[in-house]
Image (cartoon, rainbow, N blue to C red):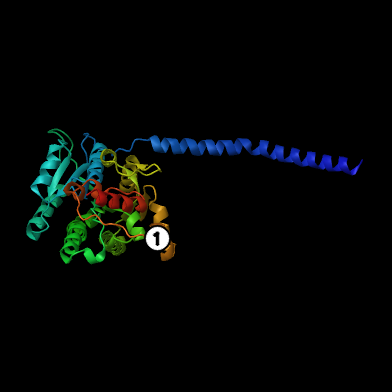
Amino acid sequence: MTDAQQLFDYARRQFNEIADDVERHFDMVAGSVGSFVYIRSNRQKRKRRVTRSASGARTDVVVVAGAVANPLASSLYLDLERRGFVVYVVTSTHQDEQHIKSLSRVDLVPLHIDLVDPFSARDQMVRFQDLLDREHQAFESAEAHRLSFAGLILVPDTKATPAEVGDISSEEWSDALNAKVLNTIATTQLFLPTVVQHKAKVMLLTPSVTPALRPPMHAIESTVYGALEGFTSSLAAELKQEGVKLSHFKLGNIDIPAVTSKQRREGALQSRLGATPLRTLQDSVFDALMAKRPRRTWHVGRGSLVYDVIGSWAPPTITAWMMGAGRRKEVATEVKDEDMHGSQGSLTWEKVEQEVSTSSGQATDR
């Protein structure tokens, strides 16, 4: 037998052995992949609903605190109400209270808390605590049940007008920190005794792309985010000793229909990459409420995890180069009132490059 024939026979034997191995393990691999796809598909398709009492009454209570008319906050409390929660929305003005009542949802209830008046706020919390402690009946002959405090969801409006530090007055700093940071802290403090007693979960939802990169002309937004992140980190360590879980949702680019349609009408620059559907965030919030041990940090939305890693590990020069630090941008000096009270103001989580270019384009148009 020649050397060529020996080499050919050796190659044929090797090929046959490889083919036999593939064939022998094919069923196992195909079965594993098929099982994984099936389980994942069922998990995505399963209905996320809250269990009710024997009489059909709702028993799980969630409190949502934030800008009431904010599209993100409104989409969350409406979705939670649809999933079977009794949702209390913290309101501070008569207009906010009327907005919640106008939605005509029986289990969507305004919870008026005036942070300026501490005595009134404490009285309201006493009534809320009494609501959780006493028994309820869905109808006259129904079995009595108690309400369970499932979670406190904080959705502060962290957005601010792009401006250089030298152009921001002390009054603007004071207003931003009071409205975006101190109000969130004060609301959390009011609910802390009830949260600890009922072992309710605490969640903070904030956009993270811009604060993670800390670009120029975003000092207020970065400062607010840093203050809230530091507050939640310390609070999480304290609540852990009480057996209470705190989760921080770092949000990226999320497709909120109310915001997206408005941006299209105004001709705003759209991201080339598709945004994460709003349903993903809603499912994540529900999963965190229902989980026994929810994650400490949730990255939801396109770019959230990537920009968080870049901002934490990349050298400042790389981040500055990505943001085009050498190019001086015009700063928008006016902001529409509706933008700061709930639409684009805290919900446009596009790439920062697009955000800066959009701001400069609006300033040029004005």
Front one among 313 and 204: 313
Residue 14, image x and y in percent?
Answer: 76, 42
Left or right: 211, with 127 as reference point: right
Secondary element at image label 1: helix
Q: Is residue 114 or residue 25 the one in the foreground?
A: 114
**x and y percent of residue 185 in the render?**
21, 60
Q: Residue 50, image x and y in percent?
A: 28, 39
Q: Relative to 128, is 8 on the left or the right?
A: right
Q: Nearer the viewer, residue 47 or 214?
A: 214
Q: Position of residue 85 (x, y in %)?
A: 23, 41
The amino acid type, in three-letter code, at marker 1 is Gly
Task: Give the residue pinned by disc 1.
Answer: 311
Task: Tell me if I can see residue 240 in this picture.
Answer: yes
Q: Decide which of 88, 331 is in the foreground and name it.
A: 331
- Residue for point 40% across, 43% down: 272
Q: Number of numbered discs present?
A: 1
Mark 1 Cα within 10 Å, few/some/many (few <14, many 20+)?
Answer: some
Which quadrant of the figure has residue 16?
top right
Which of the 4 image quadrants contains residue 234? bottom left
Res. 66 visible in picture:
no
Q: Is residue 132 left or right of residue 267?
A: left
Quadrant of residue 72 in the image?
A: top left
Residue lying at 20% horizontally and 62% vertically, measured from the top left: 177
